[in-house]
Amino acid sequence: MKQLLIAVALLVSLVASAQDGQKKNLVKVNMLSPIVRTGSFFYERKISSNSSLQLGVFYTGSKMDDLKLRGFGITPEFRYYASEKGAMEGFYLGPFLRYQSYELSELNNKGKLNTFGGGLLIGKQWIFTKGISVDIFAGPSYNSGTVKVTNGTDNFDLPGGLNGFGVRAGLTVGIAF
């Protein structure tokens, strides 16, 4: 978690040193993630007049009923903007991939879950005059993985979004530079 915070601090420091008026980069935080005890951060970079690449990372220490999760994920995403304003503003489609790695504990069971998956988002992003961004998105996802049991049985009660079909959604606030 400390490494994530250091990386975000370095990216934010780049905002102060941005020389030209073109905003080709965004650093964002998902405002909904704390609801599930997760920190979720994104870096988006404009690559053409109507597309961008985004890299998201998260770390969680959440609990769902008796299941405790501790781990991280990484989410590369391509975004195609279908608006007149071009890349990084307006409506977009975002196909993404996702890798997740968790340590699990539930009652007397302990294990490790690694998943790989992807999905498709639809969203809308705004960048205001001071460089503040707001992005809202949602879409289906699918993750497939295996649990390696380290103690107990393999009776983990996993929610659908961790291993199977789920929904990825968020509301981010960030800084464009």
Image (cartoon, rainbow, N blue to C red):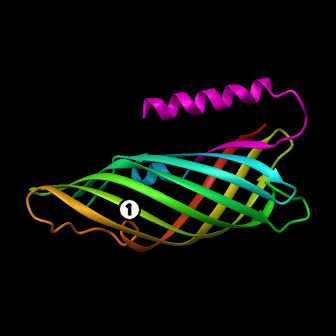
Q: Vertically, is 130 above or below 61? A: above
- Residue depicted at 63% across the width and 58% down the height: 77
Q: Nearer the viewer, residue 6 or 107?
A: 6
- Residue depicted at 83% across the width and 68% down the height: 82
Residue 111, magenta (yes or no) = no
Q: Vertically, is 48 above or below 153? A: above
Q: Vertically, is 13 above or below 55? A: above
- Residue depicted at 59% across the width and 63% down the height: 96
Q: Vertically, is 96 above or below 127? A: below
Q: In the rendered image, is residue 65 in sight?
A: no
Residue 93 pos. (x, y %): 71, 69
Q: In the rendered image, is residue 58 in sight?
A: yes
**Local crowd size for mark 1, using a 10 Å CA cut-off: few (<14), some (14–19), many (≥20):** some
- Residue depicted at 82% across the width and 56% down the height: 87
Q: Secondary structure at mark 1?
A: strand
Q: Nearer the viewer, residue 171 or 164?
A: 164
Residue 19, magenta (yes or no) = yes
Residue 85 pos. (x, y %): 90, 59
Q: Amino acid at mark 1?
A: Thr
* Residue 49, image quadrant: bottom right
Query: In the rendered structure, which segment of residues is drawn in magenta?
Result: 1-30
Residue 145 pos. (x, y %): 34, 66
- Locate the C terminus by quadrant: top right
Numbered marks: total: 1
Question: With 63 as the anchor, is 46 left or right in this view?
Answer: right
Residue 122 pos. (x, y %): 67, 70
Q: For mark 1, what is the residue?
A: 115
- Locate the N terminus by quadrant: top left
